[in-house]
Image (tube, helix red, strand yellow):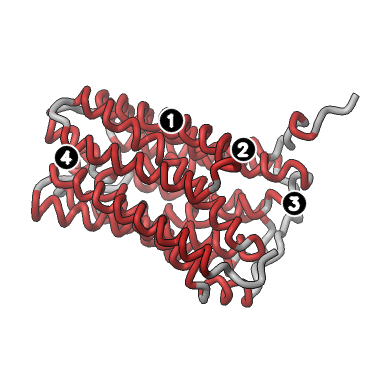
Amino acid sequence: MTRPASRQRLPAVLWPLMFGNVVIGMGVMVVAGLLNEIRSDLSVSVTTAGHLISASALLVCLGAPLLAMLVARWDRRRLLVGSLLWYALFHALAALAPGFDALLTSRVLAMVSAAVFTPQAAACIGQLVPEHQRGRGITFVFLGWSVASVLGTPLGAWIGGTFGWRWTMGLMALLSLVAALWLHARMPRGVVPPPLSASAWRQTLLSPTLMLTLSITVVSAAGQFVFFSYMAPYVADRFGLGAAALSSLLLVYGLCGFIGNAAVSRWIDRIGPPRAMAWALGGIALGMGLVGLTSSFNAMVLAIVPWGLGVFASNSSQQARLVNLAPVLAPASIALNTSAMYAGQAIGAGSGGWLIQAAGITSLPTAGCIGLICALGLSLWAGRQARRHPVPGQP
């Protein structure tokens, strides 16, 4: 008896692709949990340590679309395995960095892999799974980022606080090597997705509706990372707590993110991506606003729940929104959305460092809340724009 399509097993190659995203996601997010240890060990200010986040995010923002064009005709087995080996190399060098400048250089170069792996892994799924399983395949591979948030980032922060941040970087190098070897063993040769056409890029960049929608990603990411980038020093300076407390906070945040993403996946087709996006952005704004009002760590843990529920839900809703607005242009708009996300992270981390110097670290949650309210306003405006001026040439 043949299994229904929804219950058929996904190809085994998706497991190492998903694990690759776990490793990439953990490497991207874990530095925010290590800032206290890094600034103490290397004798730099919290603002200077924040450059590890802003500079890396800026590289991914600029590099993702450029690298997508550069590697368009590369065999994906060689490309994805190579990007994980690159990630392993520069995390190993980061673990051995003698000073902050060497660490920053290693960190920025490692992020080349983040600019390559996740978007290119998604791009090749269409050639690895049957058409009726593509939706499940993409969701499964992107599950790696949720796993990184729930387990990887809190674990990395705990290891950094207990044994030192260099051990976390060493762990990242080891996990990257394992992911590369696993993917090399499972990924078939000759997988080369069709490249995006110049006309698709042009039509996407010249669409006011799509550009307005993508601006939501920039503002939302900036609002979140103005505070998330400095959560470790915030917890230390505000409550006098260390790595164990931070790890528990990140665990709650990650679990809520997982639950929120599962909920939006279940309901998004019923309520529509714009409404799901509004609820998610509203939850993040509420959470950040409540964090700014808390006077104890336990209250902060409770306050962060609505933020966590909205964080991955907003990402999923935004991608679904872009696909619905212009299915034909989805490869280009999703690639630009990745750049927009990292642009927002760079802006947020940079702005957060400036705010710490200008107004103190306690100003960050309120600043983030204001940013998310602006993102919500943009989202509502973009919904009206899409109804009045739909993207031309779409089915």
Label whose residue precedes the other's in the sequence (2 or 4): 4
* Quarter of image, res 341: bottom left
Front residue of this view, candidates 340 and 28? 340
* Residue topped by disc 3: 127
Quarter of the image that includes the C terminus: bottom right
Q: Relative to 123, is 97 on the left or the right?
A: left
For label 4, the crowd category at 10 Å Cα-Cα, with few meaning under 14, some 14 to 19 and many 20 or more, is few
Label whose residue precedes the other's in the sequence (2 or 1): 2
Label whose residue precedes the other's in the sequence (4 or 3): 4
Marks 3/2 in contact by CB < 8 Å: the verdict is no
* Disc 2 to disc 4, C-alpha distance: 38 Å
Secondary structure beneath dot 3 equals helix
Q: Which residue, as the protein is rendered here, is positioned at the far right?
A: 1
Marks 3/1 in contact by CB < 8 Å: the verdict is no
Please report the residue visible at 29 percent of the width from the left and 59 percent of the height from the top. 347
Q: Amino acid at mark 3?
A: Gln
